[in-house]
Amino acid sequence: MSERVTVAKTYKLFIGGKFPRSESGRVYPVTDSKGNFLANAAHASRKDVRDAVVAARKAFPGWSGATAYNRGQVLYRVAEVLEGRRDQFVAEVGAAEGLSGRRAEAVVDAAIDRWVWYAGWTDKVASVLGAANPVAGPYFSFTVPEPTGVVGILAPQKSSLLGLVSVLAPALATGCTAVVVSSAERPLPAITLSEVLATSDLPGGVANILTGRAAELGPWLASHGDVNALDPTGAEDRAELAREAAGTVKRVLAVPADEPDWTQRPDIARLRRYLEAKTVWHPMGV
């Protein structure tokens, strides 16, 4: 019996709930922390960015209009599927980041817990960040948070899963839809996460994950007129991205110069950044 030939995988993009090839046809090799070949990943193009934004915009009314309880249940379901593929994530995170088995397990467990933590905020954030305003007149006045829209996210380059979850989950929890550019050198956990999203209850287009270089794709996201906010965490030239975003009056998240320690306990700052405050006046007795 002849020896089996290893089948080299060539992964695709995740756009609109489907897995298309890159319009450019480009792929690039992905290696582990020691330089050993793991797989090929699609290299997204400007056209792929546009397609992903179209899918995210199309999904926004349904996702933002869903009840907070429903969004929470969908995100909890994602966590369940994440847990079911825990061993695969441990192997991929360990290979990508050069972590020992036990350390990779801790990182993956933290990522799953982080997803659950943000899922739990879906039906609480309105109470915490909203208000009933005291006014001098016969009116009720309420301030309610609303999702800002389509969010472009340049994912962390070092933390391939925990960092990715920490930037994507808050956007989805608030009712926004997202276009994510994964870590260029460590994309496999992001690709597996896209498979998790595709097999959970998340509607197609709510999260779109592209693989490729943030330096190439970031400016297209920043200048796109249908993207409402940009998280430049994984970008190098953030000043240039801010200038590109200014042309469409886009919100750009203020992020630290160096990649943060994602193992630290999160707060609701990222939730707040993806919300707009809407104040409603209503006359009493009507």
Image (cartoon, helix red, strand yellow):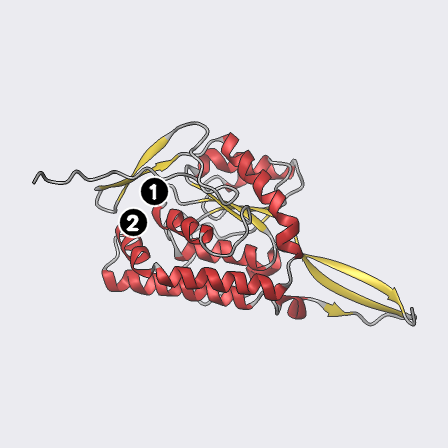
Q: Is residue 126 above or below residue 199?
A: below
Quadrant of image for the C terminus: bottom right
* Relative horizontal placement of residue 74, taking residue 42 as reference (left or right): right
Which residue extends farthest left?
1
Q: Quadrant of the N terminus?
A: top left
Q: Residues within 10 Å of mark 2 (few under 14, many from 20)?
A: many
Q: Residue at x 33, y 34 (%)?
A: 28
Residue where numbered disc 2 is placed: 96
Q: Is residue 231 visible?
A: no
Query: Where in the figure is residue 93, as x and y percent of width and height?
Result: 31, 54
- The local secondary structure at tag 2 comes to helix
Q: Earlier in the sequence, mark 1 or mark 2?
A: 2
Q: Position of residue 9 (x, y in %)?
A: 29, 39
Q: How many marks?
A: 2
Residue 168 visible, this orientation: yes
Q: Mark 1 — residue?
A: 185
- Residue 177, disc: none
Q: Are marks 1 and 2 in contact (CB under 8 Å)?
A: yes
Asked if residue 242 lies left or right of residue 236, the reply is right
Q: Amino acid at mark 1?
A: Glu
Task: Tell me the distance, in whole angstroms, between the alpha carbons under discs 1 and 2.
Answer: 8 Å
What residue lies at 25% left-to-right and 53% top-to-bottom? 98
At label 2, which amino acid type do we have? Ala
Q: Nearer the viewer, residue 258 or 12?
A: 12
